[in-house]
């Protein structure tokens, strides 16, 4: 499952290199954060043990590793794949689910605060694209269902 | 300059309407050609949506771009996350025509068309490249000489570099240039390009988020920064709200956090209220007080009085 998401050849070089350790904010400042151990586990096929750990959520997605990386890959990709897998298995931080649910329900991650706008003399907020977004979402869901049916047959 | 719309995103209108006030005051004050339009949704956020459903992430961002495109407007955003997410999808669709066709086939059902031809900019590079130093200098009434700003870029203003292409992704200069245009000093400091760390608050790791906030704020206190300058609601949340929480716990660092438009707006002569500064949780008073003091003509010292005037021998 994870190997479909990731390019293992690039990841092997990533495990051998580590040039981005000196620039990664979490590597520098959060104790115990060590993406290469995670990557080595992925390559060895025993990554399951990382899924429930805080560690895989500590990548800040600042993209500094991506910019440093001579492969333009960066271990951010490995962390993203691990997060996806953890989310699929339901072992994710509660906030992630709350945020995603709000997004698919309303198309936004928060609504404009009206009383404060009035006080600040700000114009009425424009209409959101919620309805159109929800329509698009249902079309997308249907197309995904069709694609997965095709895969099954 | 082509007309543009401002992509406010979710966080500014939902949590920091006073930042919207600041941006609008400056855009109106400089008579820049923008207008608000209906139809935007969340950009959407990468760490939340892209990590769970890449297809939905692509469609949502592409739809937002198509909404502005339908009105013939460029997009300028005061949120680094929004502009980075939109630009990442735009760059992906530019290089992947098959995906672009897939997006457009879904868009048929909602009557949209994605072309990907409009320009997306973050507010800071936009002021640097499109408004320009001359227009800024002629719009300001007072400058910031003597004031020390710690610029905090915010990762997604210029990264990923392949999508944004607006500055050096590992050694950006434009925000510093703008501070210097306004006469302020842009400090060099060790943690300048370190990520704010706010992402940790979104995955229930509040203590780690504070660790990251402390790192920068402590250095700035040691160096005597007058204010932190940034232009991202997520970084603002990290340094203003979280600094306030630390203050409540007895750890007072006292670094005022200013949005780029707060700084420009003050220089243009706007008052604190016009820029929503009373909404900030960390008191900006000390910054304003020092600025006032710097503006007063220096008093003559005793020795200057004695040596001043006529020479020693009368001619």
Image (cartoon, coloured by chain):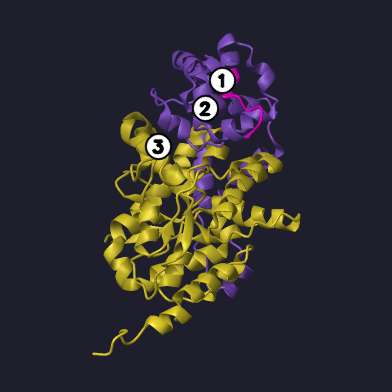
Chain colours: A purple, B yellow
Label 1 crowd (10 A; few <14 / some 14-19 / many >=20)? some
* Secondary-structure class at tag 3: helix
Q: Which residue is mark 3?
A: B103
The residue that disc 1 covers is: A36
Q: Position of residue B184 (x, y in %)?
A: 41, 63
Spatial separation of the CA atoms under disc 1 and disc 3: 35 Å
**Residues at marks 2 and 1 on the same chain:** yes
Spot occupied by residue B56 in the image (x, y as percentages of width and height): 50, 37
Work out whether residue A18 or residue B291 is closer to the camera in this orientation and state it.
B291
Labels 3 and 2 touching (C-beta < 8 A): no
Front label number (1 vs 3) = 1
A86 relative to B191, above or below: above
Q: Chain of mark 1?
A: A
| Residue tagged 2 | A21
Whether the residues at callouts 2 and 1 have beta carbons within 8 Å, the answer is yes
Rendered position, A79 above or below A2: below
Between B288 and A5, the one nearer to me in the picture = B288
**Residue B314 numbered tag:** none
């Amino acid at each position: 499952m994870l190997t479909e998401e990731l390019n293992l050849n690039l990841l092997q070089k990533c495990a051998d290199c580590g040039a981005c350790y000196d620039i990664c904010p979490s590597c520098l400042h959060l104790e115990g954060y060590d993406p290469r151990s995670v990557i080595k586990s992925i390559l060895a096929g025993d990554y399951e043990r990382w899924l429930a750990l805080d560690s895989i959520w500590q990548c800040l997605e600042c993209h500094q590793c991506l910019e440093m990386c001579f492969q333009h890959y960066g271990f951010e990709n490995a962390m993203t794949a691990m997060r996806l897998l953890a989310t699929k298995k339901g072992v994710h931080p509660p906030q992630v689910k709350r945020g995603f649910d709000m997004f698919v329900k309303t198309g936004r991650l928060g609504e404009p605060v009206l009383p404060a706008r009035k006080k600040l003399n700000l114009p009425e907020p424009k209409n959101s694209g919620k309805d159109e977004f929800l329509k698009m979402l249902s079309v997308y869901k249907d197309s995904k269902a069709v694609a997965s049916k095709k895969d099954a047959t | 300059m082509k007309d543009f719309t401002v992509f406010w995103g979710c966080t500014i209108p939902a949590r920091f309407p006073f930042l919207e006030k600041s941006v609008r005051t400056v855009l109106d004050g400089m008579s820049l050609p923008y207008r608000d339009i209906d139809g935007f949704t969340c950009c959407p956020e990468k760490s939340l949506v892209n990590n769970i459903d890449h297809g939905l992430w692509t469609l949502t961002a592409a739809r937002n771009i198509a909404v502005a495109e339908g009105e013939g407007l460029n997009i300028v955003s005061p949120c680094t996350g929004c502009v980075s997410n939109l630009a990442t999808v735009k760059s992906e669709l530019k290089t992947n025509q098959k995906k672009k066709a897939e997006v457009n086939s879904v868009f048929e059902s909602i009557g949209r068309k994605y072309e990907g031809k409009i320009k997306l900019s973050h507010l800071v590079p936009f002021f640097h490249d499109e408004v320009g130093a001359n227009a800024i200098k002629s719009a300001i009434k007072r400058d910031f000489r003597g004031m020390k700003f710690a610029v905090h870029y915010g990762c997604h203003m210029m990264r990923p570099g392949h999508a944004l292409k607006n500055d050096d992704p590992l050694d950006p200069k434009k925000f510093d240039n703008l501070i210097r245009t306004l006469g302020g000093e842009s400090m060099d400091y060790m943690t300048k390009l370190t990520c704010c760390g706010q992402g940790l608050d979104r995955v229930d790791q509040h203590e780690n988020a504070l660790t990251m906030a402390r790192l920068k704020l402590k250095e700035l206190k040691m160096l005597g920064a007058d204010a932190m300058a940034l232009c991202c609601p997520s970084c603002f949340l990290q340094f203003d709200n979280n600094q306030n929480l630390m203050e409540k716990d007895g750890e007072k660092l006292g670094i005022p956090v200013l949005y780029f438009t707060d700084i420009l707006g003050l220089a243009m002569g706007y008052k604190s209220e016009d820029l929503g500064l009373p909404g900030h949780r960390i008191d900006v008073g000390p910054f304003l007080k020092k600025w006032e003091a710097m503006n007063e003509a220096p008093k003559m010292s005793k020795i200057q009085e004695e040596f001043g005037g006529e020479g020693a021998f009368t001619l």
